[in-house]
Amino acid sequence: MYDRFPRIGLKERIGQQDMSLDIADAYINGYNAMIEAGVGIGKSFAYLIPGLLINQVSRQPVIIATSSIQLSEQIHKDLRFIGSRLGFTTVRSVVGKGMGQYACRYRAAELFKPDDSSSSPLSTLAGRILNYEIDERADIEGGTSDAVWSNVCVNDCKFEHCHYKSTCTFYEMRAKINASAGDMDFIIVNQDLLIRDLIKKKEGTKGLITERPALIVIDEAHNLEAKVRDARTLEFTFRGTCRILDDVLQILFKQSADTGLMGQFKFVKRCVSHVFKQVEADLLHTAKQDNDRIKVSEITGIPLRQAAQILKELSLSLSVLTSRREREIDNAFEAMNGLIDLFDVLAGAKDNYLIWASNSQRESTISICPKGISQFLKYTLFNGKTSVILTSATMCQGGETLEEQYAYLTESLGYRGDYMERQASPFDYDDHTMMYIAKDVPYYSHKDRKSYLDAAYKEMLRLCNLTGGRTLVLFSAKEDMKYIHEKLNSEALTWTLHMQREGSSQDGVIAEFRGSKGVLLSTGVFWEGVNIEGSDLSQLIIFRLPFPVPSDPIYEYKASLAENPLKDVFVPDMLLRLRQGTGRLIRSETDLGVLSILDSRLSAAAKKDYREQVLDALPFKKVTEDFRVLEKFVNEKGIQRSDPHSLA
């Protein structure tokens, strides 16, 4: 395969070839492999090329799971490109996304009001879905808000009972990813879908994805732990919980017409109401930001065990029902079991769950999640039935041996398998980049947040002017980003200011940023998967080191198991995220750029134990805390804007 590369106009990369050989070896000998693949080695080709051969030999599909829609789409394009170049002309492939990405014509029909002259944006959107203009969220030019889209996306599919199924993109996708072994060659899904499939198969119900894949490749595997936690987390709002109870009451009452049911449901609803009142009070006193996850204080004065017992009896009544509406009963049964778990956790009858509250859905939400996810993955994914390849540009920490370097992810994921040599990035970081640490910005603290933000703001302004814009700023907190955005809006800037948009696709704002060569403020999705090559992006600013919040119940639990929580949990987690973020800067062999970190905890004077660990983990070898040294580097490399007078 690789011998043909020069003939078909492709560049040979040693790291890519080594990775392909490692994957082929893992498949042939039936073991799992973990491989860190540095930026620029061509990671997707490195697993697609052996994948094409493995599929050809086995006649079984290859599953590729990613952590973002953008990456799934890119892999699909790469598969088409490399497959046709290497002579695989009839590769059958499908991209599977989560339910929430697809438009639902059944729901749109209920919202569409053709006679309404002042038709609302929602009715207009519903009309476009019914006219087959929109199949997926990505089809909406300029995007739409989560609040609007949540009304028209697939959230509770009727599957074969829906009369729109023959023209439904979601229904078609679900059929393709569950195709028989010989009917599909590549199944590209997001990690969430793969995890849902593993959960269903573990519970003994029919899976979502084909039963017998030849190989499973998990790209961006550093996200897998968080994705598993999200998939195994049950969320409850007051309205949502009442809806579950109403649905179950309706199903049971239809079957038995038992009026005694009413009293039981009223009793449970009263308990639910009291629980949410207390949680709302907790959030009011403790949560600083909307997405903060806080502890739920002990619930008192509510007969939780009695309510749990009633729910168990109702669940038993559901389990013995037989009806043509089997899926509806199954869904209600699953939802009831979730409620039973919630009441058991609240009553202290189950201690193998974590519980927290948040305002994430703009209403009080209680979440529960099993504590140990590593056991789940050990037995459902790394069980030796199919070779699993875990890869990402950021998997390793410091350490002498490969086991030590991959230790944090191994522990978090319950990984069983072999470790492959790290394939380093071929880019010339030594000559093309410099890292600047802002030593004079005060430490961040919640009590004195404003002092930090104002000092970091001044430093950020100076840095953006140095490169004449062309800067991506990565924030750890949305509140910090909004504060800086407001301050910048009141300044007379010499460059255009952009801020990320709500929703999953950020292509529009990236195109505007490239066009204006301005400054883009971002958080969340921009820490990974964003690819801006060339001089349009000449500086990356990390506003604060992306440490997880110590009071977050998940990290509090992980810390409670560690000998040294800072060293064993918080620093490794921060490093994975920091390496992802800093990987946005250099995207090609000719790229030049500056990485600026506005967090003085990393300065030499701060004497933090993890400073050396951070510097070792990042590929930037020229490091300075002196702005004049940075200025000299920017001038020598010609990184500044070609018209320096425009900065006067």
Image (cartoon, rainbow, N blue to C red):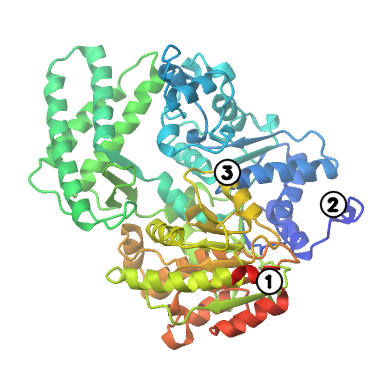
Write down the quadrant of residue 21 in the picture: bottom right
What residue sits right under mark 1 in the picture?
Answer: 639
Q: Nearer the viewer, residue 463 or 490?
A: 490
Q: Position of residue 155 (x, y in %)?
A: 43, 30
Residue 470 visible in the picture: yes
Label 1 crowd bin: few (<14), some (14–19), many (20+), radius 10 Å = many
What residue sits right under mark 2 in the picture?
Answer: 1
**Is residue 14 depicted above or below 239 in this figure?**
below
Nearer mark to the viewer, of 2 and 1? 1
Identify residue type, mark 1: Ile
Left or right: 102, with 73 as reference point: left
Dot placed on the residue nearer the N-terminal end, 3 or 2: 2
Kindly identify the residue that appears in the image at 26 percent across and 13 percent down: 255
Identify residue type, mark 2: Met
Q: CA distance from mark 2 to mark 1?
A: 39 Å
Q: Quadrant of the C terminus?
A: bottom right
Dot placed on the residue nearer the N-terminal end, 1 or 3: 3
Mark 3: secondary structure: helix
Dot placed on the residue nearer the N-terminal end, 2 or 1: 2
Label 3 crowd bin: few (<14), some (14–19), many (20+), radius 10 Å = many
Left or right: 149, with 54 as reference point: left
Kindly identify the residue that appears in the image at 28 percent across and 44 percent down: 365
Q: Position of residue 480 (x, y in %)?
A: 39, 61
